[in-house]
């Protein structure tokens, strides 16, 4: 009898919880996520539209005669594209990519395209993960994306090292969109841990621009590598906000209401500070640039504004119920709005008529502010008891000589790989041997995976 009386009460509690969750989600808009962030500077944001165009160039069959070029073209010299890899070349182990030598910006760029909806190998790569499956450098990462990064590095390491030695003043940039953005972030992490394998290049020469990335690393890693990894998110984009493992979404597609009910109860009953303490929970990587172009309860698009921060809590925790959630994920829209935002920044600077010397001083000040913001984020991660978070040290991640900003990093051994000596860094061979096998012909094949060429 008592049980029968309690059931209606439980139903009421459940309905109230669902109503509260739906009310909060309906009132949540994309602009709220970055409401307290600072405005991005034009000098910091300038590479983003260019990187978007390089990623988009992967969709062309012939760069000399492009069919889908954005207004103004891709802005690249086809003769400077040193290497292009298609699905036939990668055999489905990673999305297609190109390696571009950008003399105009003194940059060596490796750009990866995003998810191809008709390629089973891309889905297999994206779903090759579960919570706690792959531990790396004191945190957790997406297993499939790490394996893809290992394949790219094994294929392109020699060429990258030669280019960095031939052009000592050039930077090395990894960029990608969606699935490719996650691979680019993994590439940056592994390269930073093995700078000696690329000719002892400085950490400050390496950077990453991840456009609309999937959640691919735990919070302590996302904050720790914020000095070299930059994520770009357009307004309501769903993917950087999708905390539910993609594997569970695809497996539960026939019972999606059940999955949504469980998500509803979890978001309602579990506080956000408890979610921060889950070491296996993955996040969007690095420093985040949020392009905001719409406001709540207002129609139409507004001139885009770019907000930036290295957030610890409130790092895109909730999906926005918006009809633009999927459209904002498209690389075409990201490039278009990023270029608009950059043009507005440059126009504002020109209107102020700031002398060039003051611009240089301002850029140096911004770099110092970014370093301090990164340190503050690391300290906040420790304060919030984020698992495996470490406070900044002048002898570790950061080192400022007083005359400028420098970055030094003492890499730590990854728990995914066996130690090879107290002072020896993780090598490419350790990584490749852990992730790959070789067949009878000596060709590299993925271990415990069945990617088939398409």
Image (cartoon, grey):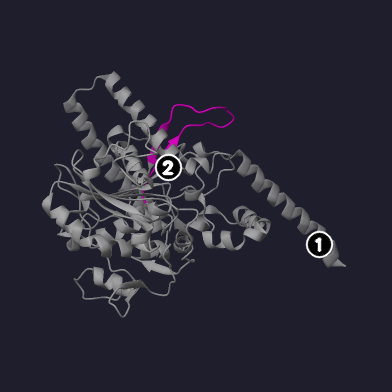
In the rendering, at what x and y percent does residue 431 appear? 29, 70
Magenta residue check for 134: no
Q: Quadrant of residue 325?
A: top right
In the rendering, at what x and y percent does residue 291 appear? 43, 36
In the rendering, at what x and y percent does residue 179 appear? 42, 54
Q: Quadrant of residue 57?
A: top left
Q: Earlier in the sequence, mark 2 or mark 1?
A: 1
Badge 2 density bin: few <14, some 14–19, many ≥20, Cα 10 Å: many
Distance between mark 2 and mark 1 Cα atoms: 51 Å
Furthest residue toward bottom:
440
Q: Is residue 380 left or right of residue 207?
A: right
Task: Name the front one of labels 2 and 1.
Answer: 2
Query: 376 above or below 431?
Result: above
Identify the mark at residue 6; answer none if there is no mark: 1
Q: How many marks?
A: 2
Badge 1 density bin: few <14, some 14–19, many ≥20, Cα 10 Å: few
Magenta residue check for 295: yes
Query: 222 above or below 155?
Result: above
Q: Secondary structure at mark 1?
A: helix
Front-most of 452 and 387?
Answer: 452
Is residue 431 something that shows in the picture?
A: yes
Q: Is residue 244 left or right of residue 23?
A: left
Q: Is residue 353 left or right of residue 114?
A: left
Q: Secondary structure at mark 2?
A: helix
* Residue at numbered disc 2: 331
CB atoms at circles 2 and 1 under 8 Å apart? no
Q: Please state, as top left, top right, bottom left or bottom right, where the C terminus lies in the image.
A: bottom left
Q: Please state, as top left, top right, bottom left or bottom right, where the N terminus lies in the image.
A: bottom right
Residue segment shown in magenta: 286-308
Residue at the image position 41 percent from the left and 68 percent from the top? 134
Q: Is residue 15 left or right of residue 300?
A: right
């Amino acid at each position: 009898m008592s049980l029968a009386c309690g059931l209606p009460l439980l139903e009421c509690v459940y309905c109230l919880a669902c109503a509260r969750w739906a009310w909060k989600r309906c009132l949540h808009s994309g602009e709220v996520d970055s409401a307290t962030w600072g405005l991005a500077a034009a000098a910091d944001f300038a590479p983003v539209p260019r990187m978007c165009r390089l990623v988009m160039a992967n969709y062309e069959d012939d760069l000399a005669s492009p069919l889908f070029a954005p207004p103004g073209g891709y802005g690249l010299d086809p003769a400077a594209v040193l290497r292009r890899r298609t699905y036939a070349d990668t055999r489905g182990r990673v999305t297609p990519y190109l390696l571009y030598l950008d003399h105009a910006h003194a940059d060596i760029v490796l750009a990866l395209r995003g998810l191809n909806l008709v390629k089973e190998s891309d889905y297999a790569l994206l779903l090759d993960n579960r919570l706690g499956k792959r531990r790396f450098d004191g945190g957790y990462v997406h297993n499939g994306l790490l394996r893809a990064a290992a394949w790219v590095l094994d294929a392109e390491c020699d060429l990258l090292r030669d280019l960095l030695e031939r052009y000592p003043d050039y930077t090395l940039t990894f960029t990608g969109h969606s699935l490719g953005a996650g691979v680019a972030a993994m590439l940056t992490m592994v390269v930073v841990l093995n700078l000696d394998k690329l000719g002892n290049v400085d950490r400050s020469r390496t950077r990453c621009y991840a456009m609309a990335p999937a959640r691919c690393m735990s919070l302590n890693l996302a904050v720790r590598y914020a000095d070299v990894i930059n994520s770009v998110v357009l307004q309501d984009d769903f993917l950087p906000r999708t905390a539910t493992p993609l594997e569970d979404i695809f497996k539960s597609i026939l019972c999606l209401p059940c999955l949504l009910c469980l998500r509803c109860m979890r978001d309602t009953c579990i506080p956000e500070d408890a979610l921060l303490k889950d070491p296996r929970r993955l996040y969007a990587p690095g420093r985040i640039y949020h392009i905001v172009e719409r406001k709540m309860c207002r129609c139409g698009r507004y001139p885009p504004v770019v907000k930036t921060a290295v957030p610890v809590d409130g790092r895109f925790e909730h999906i926005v119920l918006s009809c633009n959630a999927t459209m904002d994920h498209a690389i075409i829209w990201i490039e278009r709005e990023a270029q608009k935002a950059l043009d507005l920044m440059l126009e504002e600077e020109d209107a102020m008529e700031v002398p060039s010397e003051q611009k240089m001083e301002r850029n140096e000040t911004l770099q110092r502010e970014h370093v301090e913001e990164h340190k503050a984020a690391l300290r906040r991660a420790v304060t919030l008891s984020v698992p495996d978070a470490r406070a900044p040290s002048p002898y570790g991640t950061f080192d400022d000589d007083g005359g400028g900003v420098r970055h030094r990093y003492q890499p730590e051994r990854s728990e995914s790989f066996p130690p090879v000596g107290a002072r020896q860094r993780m090598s490419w061979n350790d990584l490749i041997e852990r992730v790959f096998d070789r067949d009878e012909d000596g060709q590299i094949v993925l271990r415990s995976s069945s990617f088939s060429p398409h």
